[in-house]
Amino acid sequence: MYARLSPWRVRPEDLEALSREVAPIVTKIKRQPGYMAGYDLTTTADTHMFVTIWESEDQMRAAFDEAAPALRPIVESGRIELLNVTFCPAEEWV
């Protein structure tokens, strides 16, 4: 398994509208080959950590390469900021 950890900064007053705006993109990501799970962790009032779990690194990278053009205008609008993305192998707890 492979994980993608994506911290995002968003103004709390923009969160509801942005959630609606990215919902179709999230749906598309969830339908990609290799997708296993996804989580939105609220780490502070203005920071969210999106964690997705994939069967393989290649499937994860392909899915986000496909999603990038749809996400780019949202990021470029300045209403949301992508911090540093981390990719790493993931293992289920035993």
Image (cartoon, grey):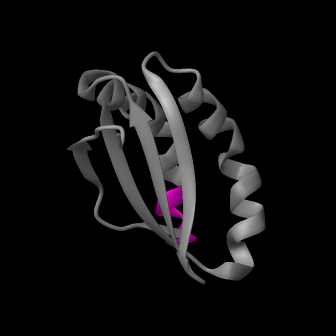
**Image quadrant of residue 28?**
top right
Of residues 8 and 53, the one drawn nearer to the viewer in this rendering: 53
Of residues 18 and 47, the one drawn nearer to the viewer in this rendering: 47
As drawn, the residue found furthest toward the top would be: 33
In percent of the image, x 41 and y 27: which residue is there? 63
Q: Position of residue 72 (x, y in %)?
A: 46, 49
Q: Quadrant of the N terminus?
A: top left
Report the number of numbered marks: 0
In percent of the image, x 47 and y 61: which residue is there? 76
**Image quadrant of residue 7?**
bottom left
Of residues 12 and 88, the one drawn nearer to the viewer in this rendering: 88
Does the magenta segment cover residue 26? no
**Image quadrant of residue 17?**
bottom right
In percent of the image, x 35 and y 68: which residue is there? 83
Region rendered in magenta: 74-79
Against 54, is 87 above or below? below
Does the magenta segment cover residue 76? yes
Against 28, is 22 above or below? below
As drawn, the residue found furthest toward the front would be: 94
